[in-house]
Image: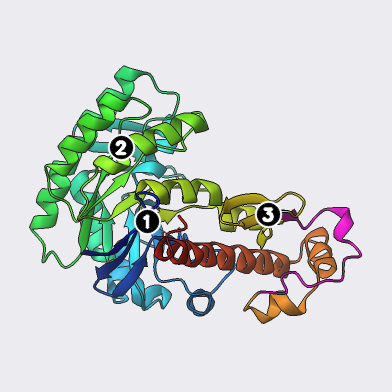
Amino acid sequence: MLKTIKLSKKSKARLGELKTNHGKIQTPFFMPIATKAAVKNVSTDELEELGAEIILANTYHLYLQPGEKIIKAHGGLHNFLNWPKPILTDSGGYQVFSLSRIRKIKEEGVEFQSHLDGSKHLLSPEKSITIQQDLGVDIMMALDVCPPGEAEFEAVREACDITFEWAKKCKEQWLKGKNEQQLFGIIQGGIFKNLRDQSLEQIASLNFSGYAIGGLAVGEPREKMYEILEYITPKMPEDKPRYLMGLGRPEEIIFAVKQGIDMFDCVIPTREARHGRLYQFCTQDEKGAILLFDNFAYKTLAATNEKYKEDFSPINPDSKVKLLKNHSKAYLHHLFKTNEGLGLRLATLNNLEFYLELMRKIREGIENNKI
């Protein structure tokens, strides 16, 4: 599934090519999040124009609404949202476990109440796989238990044990199908290195198509996250894709890439866009710049800040998106102040373009041994 093209001479970073049923993807890459079969405020045509090669959808949400059977009858998720390129779905585990007050973990799965209507459901490992198979996606995730970052050792150990048992059931269910879709296992263990080692050994023994690091950026101190990433990533199978779930800020992505991570997803581009926070590249000597590598830096701007009220410069003069080159920061400020939906679209387009261009620059940096 993964073809390694180049290993950096400066770090553990690597360039690769990931093969899926709906095309090849250059690694490392970032997946815009289409939680409910839509990336907020943008169309799939716009995603293609921005250069997105893969998107991520959510099993939990699509199971509850509109239901996987409707999507299957539509010809699968690709047809449903009109996206010709690869799609990854998470198992729904994180969403279920975030509903801590209305769910119960059992040996056979997790019992929860729908956040929509309060109806009761049991999401088993087998059911999670069959839902994702009905969705027809390219990459599926095994159902896991994701404990919070502040969880004690025993709680994290129990989560690892359940994750392994469920991973075995997921693999068994996957083997009953045509195996056209790839299935990834998830490594848990919190901030405890021995539990990370244990989980990695267990999950890797099942020979999944790829491996994800789960349970980071869920409330633990940032320095601990970096420590675990640096510790566990180089131990993961070299011939399989490595996926860091739910991260992160540009400097965190750079750090993870240097450890050998290939795949990323995060809500930051779309979530922060909805609050008027825009990411843009700059030189390292600009005010507020955060250096990433080799004089490559970025900054953020808050569109709601009064200083942009009379700033008639383009939102982003270097953008490939006409809307971002033709509209001013003053206009964007006005849109947010008047709660006009176009402001959300412009900010989202800006941030998604930034993140996708960030990954392109990272791949270029690895090629030139600058990362």
Precedes in sequence: disc 2 or disc 3: 2
Q: Residue at x 55, y 52 (%)?
A: 250
Please name the residue that numbered disc 1 is placed on.
Answer: 263
Q: Quadrant of the N terminus?
A: bottom left
The answer to which of 89 and 358 lies nearer the viewer is 358
- The residue beneath circle 2 is 232
- Indicate which disc, 1 or 3, sits on the residue closer to the N terminus: 1
Q: Secondary structure at mark 2?
A: helix
Say what secondary structure mark 1 lies in: strand
Sooner in the amino-acid sequence: mark 2 or mark 1: 2
Say which of 289 and 134 sits in front. Answer: 289
Q: Main secondary structure of the magenta part?
A: loop
Contact between labelled residues 1 and 2, with CB atoms less than 8 Å apart: no
Q: Say whether marks 1 and 3 touch (CB < 8 Å).
A: no
Quadrant location of residue 274?
bottom right
The amino acid pointed to by label 2 is Ile
Check disc 3 and give the amino acid type: Gln
> Is residue 308 magenta-colored?
yes
Query: Which range is magenta?
Result: 300-318
Q: Is the residue marked by circle 1 packed among few (<14), some (14-19), or many (20+) residues within 10 Å?
A: many
Q: Residue at x 72, y 77 (%)?
A: 325
Residue at 36% over, 30% down: 190
Q: Report the residue at 37% width, 37% height from top.
A: 230
Question: Residue 124, image x and y in percent?
Answer: 22, 43
Horizontal and vertical percent for residue 260? 34, 50
Residue 40 shown left or right of residue 109 in the figure: right
Q: Is residue 113 visible?
A: no
Q: CA distance from mark 2 to mark 3?
A: 31 Å
